[in-house]
Amino acid sequence: MSRVLAALLLAATGLAAIAACQPKPLDPKAALIAKGRDLFFNETFGGNGRTCGTCHRQEENLTITPEFIATLPKDDPLFVAEFVPALKENFENPRLMREFGLIKENLDGFDSLATRFTMRGVPHTLALGTSVQSPAGPRTGWSGDGAPADGSLRSFAVGAVIQHFTKTLDRVADVDFRLPTDEELDALEAFQLSLGRQQDLQLPLPLRGLVAQRGQAIFMDDGLGKCNICHSNAGATTSLGGNNIGNSNFNTGVEDLPDQPAHMIGERVPRDDGFRTPGDSTFNTPPLVEAADSGPFFHNNSVETIEGAVSFYSGQAFNRSPSGRFLASTDPRKVGIQLDATQTVEVAAFLRVINALENMRQAMAELEEVEGLGFFERARGRELLERASHETLDGIDVLAGAGLHPEAVAELVKARELTRRATASLFNRRGHTVDAKAAHARARALLIQEAP
């Protein structure tokens, strides 16, 4: 073989290798989701600088907490009420936002900003495809009516821009903001529906830990925990008489809790009237698989821990509420929910374990996608690895927060370190990624028995 021919063959081989490493074009659905992601986290719609991701933080499970807020710089768009004069009054309550993660909502209209408002936490946007559907139409936001017009996720984005992105309290389209186009709404909807689980669990799960096993049994016992009635399969749909009736609204008495933190500091916090205008004091059912790492809990962030949230349902506020009385009426003994301290901890342990399993599932999916990337797709790989690292840390915190499965926690710590190495590596990204997946698999096997 001549030197010229050998050189040509070598060059062709090199070009083929480089071509194989080039990013593959996205299919139409993936491209739409990618466009929606960019809009969600980067598009300000000509407003005050906020994006959807200003409150729904990627690093915080698409929600936001006071602890995270405390890490933000003073000029973060979340704080526009503190440095934009036109938004200083009646747009946000900076103290309630910083101390309790509460955001001002004018769900009953904008005609009396000083008196007609609610203060709510930021709901996560995970597993929306399994959570918002009901026979009466979509249930979005904490009270199920977070979207104007048809109540859809597309309309939810429109309502969010009007409420949160405006430059002034006049809220005039094409002056204070621009409304999303139909194409942008399609992309935002596709992205939001892609987040998190795409289907509900099928309980019971073959869990390994005795505490979580007992918690699952209590959760599914319609005579004891009664949890599975309103949170079928730990999701957001209601099951009555064996019939799934979709996402539903309930008055659970959360607004009747005494000593709510936000009410005790002297700031005006009107009673939240819930669904519709004027409201009927009901709020819709959120999914529980993602609950343990997305607190504080309830629409007003009134409870800090998952154990506290479970305990609420054995208290007077719930059992005296319309929903509590209804549950008692379905019980042959005519009693509501009466879990003792250990049973409360057991149900919370079950919720922590299924949350950690979901963290692992998401991290594993992102690591698998990294495996399939080409050498030159460095930015995409880094983004996926960072998301996998966040999910892994959430799994660690959720389990370690209650002293659950320390051996699995140790494997997750290894998985996170390997994920970090993959992020920093130039030539061994794939090797570290494979090892991180293996650590996740070992951790998962300590939490749940895999099918043979």
Image: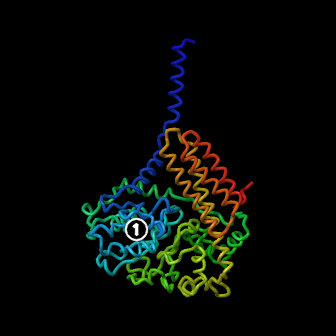
Q: Is residue 185 left or right of residue 132?
A: left
Residue that sits furthest to the top in the current view: 2
> Which quadrant, please, contains the C terminus?
bottom right
SS label for mark 1: loop
* Percent of width and height locating residue 144: 45, 72
Q: Which residue is mark 1?
A: 147
Between 63 and 117, the one nearer to me in the picture: 63
Q: Is residue 143 visible?
A: no
Count of all numbered marks drawn on residues in the image: 1
Residue at 33 percent across and 69 percent down: it is 82
- Against 302, residue 32 (above or below) is above
Q: Is residue 346 left or right of residue 138?
A: right
Residue that sits furthest to the left in the current view: 175
Q: Amino acid at mark 1?
A: Ala
Q: Quadrant of residue 308?
A: bottom right
> Which quadrant, please, contains the N terminus?
top right
- Against 203, residue 250 (above or below) is below
Q: Quadrant of residue 182?
A: bottom left
* Percent of width and height locating residue 404: 67, 67
* Percent of width and height locating residue 296: 51, 72
Between 413 and 238, the one nearer to me in the picture: 413
